[in-house]
Amino acid sequence: MKHAFPDNFLWGGAIAANQVEGAYLTDGKGLSTSDLQPYGIFGGIIPRVSGDSYIKDVAIDFYHRYPQDIALFAEMGFKCLRISIAWTRIFPQGDESQPNEAGLAFYDRLFDEMAKYNITPLVTLSHYEMPYGLVKNYGGWGNRKTIGFFEHYARTVFQRYQHKVKLWLTFNEINMSLHAPFTGVGLEQESAKSEVYQAIHHQLVASAKAVAALHQIIPDGRIGNMLLGGLMYPLTCKPADVLETLQQNREWLFFGDVQVRGYYPSYMARYFKQHNISIEITAEDKVALKETVDFISFSYYMSGCVTADEELNRKARGNILSMVQNPHLASSEWGWQIDPDGLRILLNELWDRYQKPLFIVENGLGAKDSPDTNGNIEDDYRIEYLNDHLVQVAEAIEDGVEVMGYTSWGPIDLVSASKAELSKRYGFIYVDRDDSGHGTLERRRKKSFYWYRDVIQSHGETLKR
Ligand code: BG6
C-alpha cells in the first residue's frame, strides 16, 4: 500500500493500569473504584473484605513483569505506549497532601524502561478508576472538592515526570459516565441525570485545570482529552431518524465541544431544560474551562445506528449496548459491529469539527484465541480487523486529516473492562491465564505480533487494501 503515514507517526499500543498491573494493594496502593468492580464495569459494586481475591487483583502481573513486556513491545518496533497511572498508587485515599513515594517510584522505573527502547509514553491520568476514599468520604465527582484533589494529583505527577513524559491525556472515555457513572465519576449507578451532569461538569473543570497545569509545568508537553468515539448513523434516511442521530451524536460530542472549544455548546441549554437538568456552573468554572486541549484522542471499536422508531428502540435496549444493529455490518463474538469505514468517517468528522490533531488511542478486536497443537496462535481475524482499520486511517490522512498516531488496544492480552474477562483477548502477545485466574502468566507471540512488527517497520506499506 502506498506510504501515507508520516515519518513521525506514533505507532504502538495502549493499556490501562487496572487492567494489567495487578498488585492491587502493593507498595501502599489504596483501593480504587475499579477494585470495587472486580467483575467489570457492568458486574456491580462489590465491597472488598480481607482475604478475598479476584482476577484484576493480579491481572497480567504487569507490575512485576513490565521489563519483559516492554521488551516485547520494543521487538514489535513500538514508537509509543499508552499507559495510565493508578491514581491510588500516588494518593491512596485521594485526599493526602503528600504522595506515596513507592507509587511514584514504580512509574519512574516503568518510564525508564520505555526510554531504553525510545518508546514514547502517552499517559492517561485517570483510566476508569479513582481512589475509593474520595467516593466514600466525599461523594466522588459529585463533590466540587474532588476538582482540587485531582489537580493536586495531576500537578504532582507532572512535576515528577516532567522530563520523562511529554504526552498526556486527562480522563479516559470521559463520555462513558453517562452510561457508567460509578466508573466515570464515582456516583451510584442509578443516580439522577442532574447529579451525573453536575459530576461531569466538575470533571470537565478538573480536566481544564490539568491542561493549565501541564502548560505551566511542562511547556514543551502536550495534553489531550479522550473520547469514546461513539459514531452513530441514522438507520434510515427518514428525517426523524437523521434528527435523532444528530441529537445522539451530540450527547458524546458535547464533551469534546467543551474540552476543545472551552465553553458549553448552545444546544446543551435546550437539552438540560428538556431533561429537567439544572447544574451549578460558577463564573470561575467558566474561566477555567477556557484552557483547552492541544489534541483530541479517542477510542474506536464500532459504530451504531439510531432510529426514532420507539418499537425498534425498545428491542435494542435489551442488548448490552442498546444500539440498533446495522444490517450491513458483521459483528465480533461480543456483538460489537465491525466498521473500518467508520474510522475514516469519524476522523474526518472530528477534524472538520475541531481542526486539532487527532490520536487514535484505542482500536482492536476482542476475540477468543486458541493455541493450536504446537502452541501457535494464528489470529488472522485480528490481523484482518486491524489491517482494515489502519487502511482507513491512511485514507483519512490522505483526506487531509492530521493524525498523530495509533495505539491499538491491549497489545498484550489483558482483563477486559466491561466484564473482567481474560478470554476476550486483544493482544499481539498471548498471556496464559483464563477467566478463573488459572495459568502460568507466560507470554507468547501470536501471528499478529509479526504482522504488526512488519506494518510498523514498513510505515504501513505492508497493509493490504
Ligand atoms: C474502552 C476502554 O472502553 O474499551 C478500555 O477504555 C476497554 O479500558 C476497551 O478495555 C475494550 O472494552 P472491553 O470491555 O472489551 O475491555
Image (cartoon, rainbow, N blue to C red):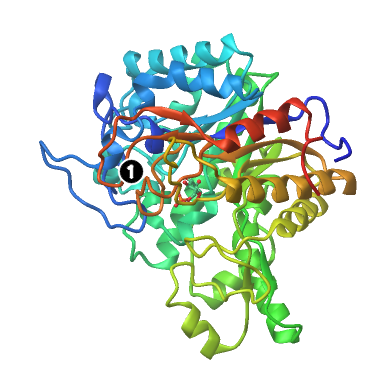
> Vertical placement of 8 versus 115: above or below?
below
Residue 451 rendering spot, x and y as whole percentages: 66, 35
Is 401 left, or right, of 94 in this rendering? Answer: right
Residue 231 rendering spot, x and y as whole percentages: 66, 62
Q: State the residue position of label 1.
A: 34
Is 93 left, or right, of 112 in this rendering? Answer: left
In depth, the one of 439 and 292 nearer the eye is 439
In depth, the one of 234 and 276 nearer the eye is 234
In depth, the one of 311 and 212 nearer the eye is 311
How many discs appear?
1
Residue that appears at 62% across and 60% down: 338
> Vertical placement of 197 versus 25: above or below?
below
- Judged from the image, the secondary structure of the residue bearing numbered disc 1 is loop
Mark 1 CB lies closer than 8 A to ligand 1: no
Residue that appears at 65% across and 72% down: 247
Residue that appears at 78% across and 35% down: 460
Tag 1: residue type? Ser
> Vertical placement of 170 versus 235: above or below?
above
Residue 216 rendering spot, x and y as whole percentages: 63, 21
Is 20 left, or right, of 4 in this rendering? Answer: left
For label 1, the crowd category at 10 Å Cα-Cα, with few meaning under 14, some 14 to 19 and many 20 or more, is many
Residue that appears at 65% across and 22% down: 77
> Vertical placement of 128 versus 115: above or below?
below
